Image (cartoon, rainbow, N blue to C red):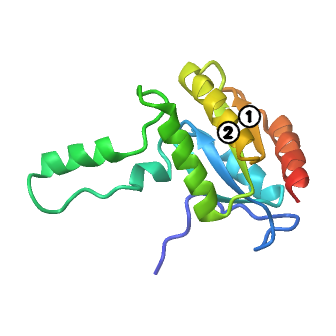
Amino acid sequence: MHAPPILPRPTCTTMCGPSSPLLLLVGPALADPILFDVIAEAGARVGGDLLDLGERYFAVDAAEEGDPLIALADRLLALTPTPTKYHSQRTRAAYLLSLIQERGAQGVIFARQKFCDPHGFDYVQMAHTLNEASVPHLLIELEQASQAGQLRTRVEAFVEMLA
């Protein structure tokens, strides 16, 4: 028997389904999952992410044979880096483009914690790459205080633009 989910699953209130816009989410670790709810309520789907503690963290498995510490170190070094670690931004941009093609995403939402310089610098390169590839994107700056109303309005407008 399965335990009930800790958080209620978001429900699409408009047009969620296979034809609703598929988005990728890029940013830091999200302390508040409200953005996922807002995207679902706007009628879009999150098809993947490039969050610091999102699916990129689980994208590479550690080798099961050999020295376990070496295997863990190799796994961590093979991950697509976060903007907080110095690395070529082209690596992240190329990974994002491949993720867009692989998942068939129609747009990207960048969620950036206000005053987070590493993600701010990263956004400039990523936005330039997405503009060259004609991929629509939206930057949302998050604050500590709840801003659900503004977030809802901006995401709904972005989803309407994609539909």
Left or right of 72 on screen, residue 42: right
Identify the image quadrant of residue 62. Answer: bottom left
First in residue order: circle 1 vs circle 2? 2
Percent x, y of residue 157: 90, 46
Question: In this rendering, would 85 be left or right of 155?
Answer: left
State if disc 2 and disc 1 touch (CB < 8 Å).
Answer: yes
The label on residue 110 is 2
Secondary structure state at the residue bearing disc 1:
strand
Q: Residues within 10 Å of mark 1 (few under 14, many from 20)?
A: some
x%, y% of residue 89? Answer: 51, 32
Q: Is residue 122 above or below residue 16?
A: above
Q: Residue at x 57, y 55 (%)?
A: 99
The three-letter code of the residue at mark 1 reads Ile
Amino acid under label 2?
Phe
Q: Which residue is mark 1?
A: 140
Which residue occupies 43% across, 43% down?
80
Q: How many marks overall? A: 2
In this view of the protein, which residue sits in the foreground, 7 or 51? Answer: 51
| Residue located 30% across and 41% down the image | 77
Task: Using the image, tell me which numbered label, if any, was put on residue 158.
Answer: none
